[in-house]
Image (cartoon, rainbow, N blue to C red):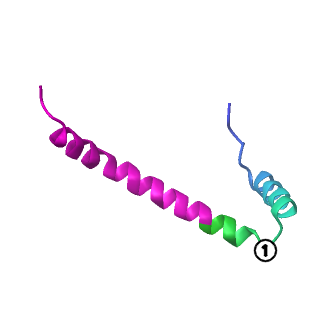
Amino acid sequence: MLTGLFEPLHLIVILGIVLLVFGGRKLPEIGAGMGKAISNFRRAYKDEPEAAKVESEKSPKV
């Protein structure tokens, strides 16, 4: 169903549209923001089991 979805020509067209919409000056800022968001998401995902364990130890047992 999704075969051939991201062929090189498709990616070039998508990049061209992004350049037209955001302009060349905004792309580095967008890339940096996306990189920070992905790293924060990974860090939060990795720390989630530890945070849940700490919360369960803090909560009073009835």
Which quadrant of the structure image shows residue 52? top left
Q: Is residue 51 left or right of residue 21?
A: left
Q: Is residue 45 left or right of residue 28?
A: left
Which amino acid does the dot numbered 1 rest on? Arg
The residue segment tinted magenta is 33-62
Say if the magenta span includes residue 46. Answer: yes
Which quadrant of the structure image shows residue 20? bottom right
Task: Specify the principal SS of the magenta part.
Answer: helix
Name the residue at the top extreme.
Answer: 62
Q: Residue at x 34, y 52 (%)?
A: 46
Q: Residue at x 43, y 54 (%)?
A: 42
- Residue highlighted by disc 1: 25
Say if the magenta span includes residue 13. Answer: no
Residue 17: horizontal and vertical position, in percent? 85, 56
Q: Quadrant of the C terminus?
A: top left
Name the residue at the right extreme.
Answer: 20
Q: Quadrant of the N terminus?
A: top right
- Asked if 30 appears above or below 60 in the picture, the reply is below
Q: How many marks?
A: 1
Q: Nearer the viewer, residue 61 or 12?
A: 61
Q: Residue at x 61, y 64 (%)?
A: 33
Q: Nearer the viewer, residue 36 or 8?
A: 36
- Asked if 34 appears above or below 10 in the picture, the reply is below
Q: Residue at x 81, y 63 (%)?
A: 22
Q: Is residue 53 left or right of residue 45?
A: left
Q: Secondary structure at mark 1?
A: loop
- Asked if 62 appears above or below 58 in the picture, the reply is above
Q: Residues within 10 Å of mark 1 (few under 14, many from 20)?
A: few
